[in-house]
Amino acid sequence: MIWLLENPDPFWPLLAEHTVLSVLPTLLGLLFALPVGAALRGRPRARALAVLIAGILFTIPSLALFVVIPGILGTQILDPLNVVLALTLYALALLVRAVLDSLDGVPVAVRSAAQAMGYAPARRIAAVELPIALPVLIPALRVVLVTNVSLVSVGAVIGIGGLGRLFTAGYQRSYPDQILAGIIGTVVLALVLDRLLALVGRSLTRWDRAGRTAA
């Protein structure tokens, strides 16, 4: 903690970078997972294949993706876009199954009623099914966000990693206190972001808690 108290100026930019590199891929992963999940529902074979591919994708080491992506896209090795793309793929891999499971939890009667009222498929999913699916989807999204906070640190090995840079710098200098500052910052950031997302989820699903209370 001594390093953190004595060096607040370099800490905050690293924290801001770590936050962006964690939150942005999570949002992008969700943005892509929602239409993919909606399209796969009702297609058992395509769904099974997509879940299999997602599982295989998540087993690829993050550092390998950070290094391979520049060769594929032609970006610079130190471009933050590499980390964003890699973590977006991880988020997509985790969220596809979560989106499918959450939409599966929507009662058939609700879907039928929305369809009878003239809702087009896309509008029905966005306005009717997705809000009902949130109690299942939000916890999965929290797991993805915290996972990304952890994985961002790995990017420090290639020079991009927010608070992870404190790990590499502390190791190179044999300065454990700097490493400890990076660990504490990463853990606190993960807890804060997780709590904020939980609060957002609670505000969006008040109807669910009200229904359970009444029951």
Image (tube, rainbow, N blue to C red):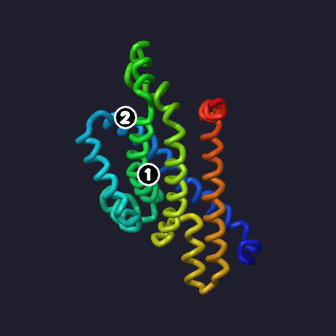
* Mark 2 secondary-structure assignment: helix
Tell which residue pokes out farthest to the front in this image: 215
The mark nearer the N terminus, 2 or 1, is 2
Q: Position of residue 147 (x, y in %)?
A: 50, 59
* Mark 1 secondary-structure assignment: helix
Residue ID for mark 2: 38
Q: Position of residue 54 (x, y in %)?
A: 33, 52
In front of the other: 145 or 213: 213
Q: Position of residue 73 (x, y in %)?
A: 33, 55
For discs 2 and 1, the disc positioned in front in the rendered view: 2
For the residues labelled 2 and 1, say whether their Cβ atoms are less than 8 Å apart: no
Residue ID for mark 1: 91
Does residue 113 appear to the left or right of 14 in the view shown? left
Q: Quadrant of residue 209?
A: top right
Mark 2 surroundings within 10 Å by alpha-carbon count, few (fewer than 14), some (14 through 19), many (20 or more): some
Q: Is residue 178 above or below residue 13?
A: below
Q: Amino acid at mark 1?
A: Ala
In front of the other: 76 or 80: 80
What residue lies at 60% left-to-right and 86% top-to-bottom? 174
Tell which residue pokes out farthest to the left in this image: 45
Q: Position of residue 34 (x, y in %)?
A: 42, 38
What residue lies at 66% left-to-right and 55% top-to-bottom? 192
Q: Is residue 198 above or below residue 186?
A: above
